[in-house]
Image (cartoon, helix red, strand yellow):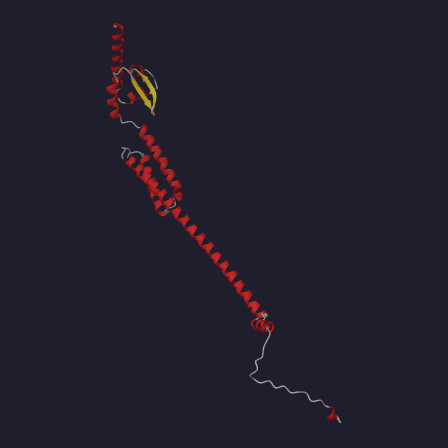
Amino acid sequence: MGASNSKNEPVYVYASQVPIGFTAQLKDKLVSEATTTPNPPAAAAAAGAMANSRDLADKVDEGVAKELARILEKNQLEELKAKERQASTSDLLREIRDVSHQIASNPTTKSPTYELALHARDRVAACLKDNAGRTLDCWKDVCEFKSLVATLESDITASIDFDTDDCIRCTIIDYDRVLVLDKGKVAEFDTPWNLLQSKGGIFRSMCEKSGEYEHLVATAQRKSQLATTSASIQ
């Protein structure tokens, strides 16, 4: 009975030569799923680590560049300071040589100040040699040397070459007027006779030290008398 109630369905056979077609939407979906791969946590972590590494490398490079710039600037500054110190030392040495030549050219070898100035000069030279390029380390010795030189120059100015001065006094003693300078300024100006009458005067003091004071006084007095007589006749 069951067999008689069964309905026979038609059988369809597809040959391998029949092409199978796909819609455009299905193709796009299949291609998208095939080319898109999920980003697992490990890959994301690796990408983050790589980015952090690049940032760190950039910061390191920036720090190195800044440090190199600082070192270069420091070296340039040190080089400039060294040149300035060298120039300062050269100027000081030149000044010392000039002063030493001035000292040596004056007949003051018997002066105690001269000997002290020579020793001070040697100490300055030794200090500059031991502290090359650091002139400030020798400032005490330099100040002492300059102070002694100033004292020596003052002594030289104040000292008198009596032989030369005697000749000058004997020559000018019969002048009408005598001009006496002290440190470049006019100290006295009058006839020789009037200047000799001024106790404590510079001209009189010079004549007293000459050893021929009486002769100079007599000459000046005679000159004064002649001038007075000449004036009365006129």
The vertical placement of 94 against 78, above or below, is: above
Residue at x 53% of width, y 65% of height: 50
Residue 234 in the figure: left or right of residue 10: left
**Camera sees residue 145:** yes
Residue 140 x, y percent position in the rendering: 40, 40
The N terminus is located in which quarter? bottom right
Residue at x 50% of width, y 59% of height: 58
The C terminus is located in which quarter? top left
Tally of numbered discs: 0
Residue at x 25% of width, y 13% of height: 223
The vertical placement of 234 against 142, above or below, is: above
**Camera sees residue 123:** no
Residue 62 in the figure: left or right of residue 233: right
The quadrant in which residue 157 appears is: top left
Residue 34 x, y percent position in the rendering: 57, 73
Residue 226 in the figure: left or right of residue 10: left
Closer to us: 13 or 193: 13
Q: Residue extending furthest right? A: 1
Residue 49 x, y percent position in the rendering: 54, 65
Closer to us: 34 or 77: 34
